[in-house]
Amino acid sequence: MENVYLLLLIFLLVFIAVTFELANKTAVVLLGVALLITLNVIDEHSAVEKIDFETIILLLGMMTLVAIIKKTGFFSFLSIKIAELTKGNPLKVLLLFSSITATLSAFLDNVTTILIIIPIIIQLTRGMGIDPKIYIISQAIISNIGGTATLVGDPPNIIIGSKVGLTFNQFLSNLIIPVMITFAATLLYIWFTNRRKFQPINTNLTKIFTFQLLLEKIRFEFLHTKLDKILITKALGCLGIVISLFVTQTITHLTPSLIAISGAMLLFVISKVKVEEILEEVEWSTLLFFTGLFILVGTLEEYGILEWVAHNVFLKAGKNPNVIVLMVLWLSGIASGFLDNIPFTITMIPIVHLMSESVAIPQNILWWSLSLGACFGGNFTVIGASANIVSIGIAKRNKVSISFLEFMKSGTAIALISLVISSVYLTIYLWLAT
């Protein structure tokens, strides 16, 4: 019993430190694991067994692919083409950048997408003489929405897919509808609440001239960078193979981790990039953070704590499938807005497993409920998702100040809209499945 109290205390302290960013999250989680081993709550062998290497290897493979593609200059080229297509129309800027952000976020790391998009959009909007704040906030929110659609789009989905054994196609086919509806509703909301800011600048000759000068400056800077077309072809080819294998996973029966890491290693072999340079771009701290969390949550499960929570909290709601599905959705959504959605998702997976065994709910619907809640809920606040934090950080470095409340004003409304859309979708889904 003493070990249980020690485990709960350590887990609670780690969760609080990670959520409120009291210290480096990776260091805190690994310190928690070290304490568990030192105090004999678990041993080293048991700790290693709790690591989900499927998730770790999948993340490593995708991070490596993205790092190589980024090195080619392709993302900069893509951003410039989008900027040219807008022709200085503020609404087109929103629509085109939102479309590319959502698409990239579905297939790449959404933090990487934000690192590419936000600096370009700040430069572009400033050149047009308009406030970049709403564009920065919108792209952070859109990246979280787009990432919800696929297995590899957002960390909660990667974790759920790896732990439960769900395929890329299952995520895409079951989540694409609520994601597309939410994407459209989000753009409509952003336009309606900021419609004065999206007035065309074609009546202002000064702004038009400034915009044209800005585009010329961007083109000039880009032309003096080294664009490796051969490497781009190889990198996009390998990415295409990886995505194709994700889609045909039910035929090939290859695991997502094997597909991702094989694609990355193939690209290393056929390209002339230096492995050491690319590996420096991999977010090793994130991978170690995941590793520590898997050990902490696995230990909670081993001691029966998560089973107790499932039976004494969630299953107290009764056995009505509609109530349970919506409870998981809304609890995940609200909690993910104020807590880090990664540890929350890892904690919830064994609980949802127990709930699905206790209540007859068909066709993995509880997993879609958890995914939609955890991913969409990240839009409530700045601290709800990594993409939000990175976006605000880039804005601050570019002297654009966005407060916690400014983000929350738009984020909360969109998160609530997203959860309402998801509630309707899941209710219909459950009705059709039963």
Image (cartoon, grey):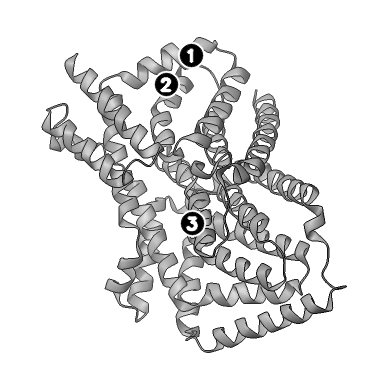
Determine the CA span between mark 2 and mark 3. 39 Å
Evaluate if marks 2 and 3 touch, with contact meaning CB atoms under 8 Å apart: no
Q: CA distance from mark 3 to mark 1?
A: 40 Å
Query: Where in the figure is residue 219, as x and y percent of width and height?
Result: 61, 84
Checking the image for residue 236, the label placed there is none
Viewer-side label of 2, 3: 3
Q: Which residue is mark 1?
A: 315
Q: Is there a contact, CB below 8 Å, between mark 2 and mark 1?
A: yes
Q: Which residue is mark 3?
A: 393
At mark 3, the secondary structure is helix
Disc tally is 3
Left or right for 252, reference 26: right
Q: Amino acid at mark 2?
A: Leu
- Please determine whether, in this image, residue 349 is positioned above or below residue 269: above
Horizontal and vertical percent for residue 16?
A: 36, 32
Marker disc for residue 354: 2
Q: Nearer the viewer, residue 333 or 299?
A: 333
Q: Nearer the viewer, mark 2 or mark 1?
A: 1
| Label 1 Cα neighbours within 10 Å, binned few <14 / some 14-19 / many ≥20 | some
Tell me, yes or no, if residue 92 can be seen here: yes
Which of the 4 quarters of the picture holds residue 354?
top left
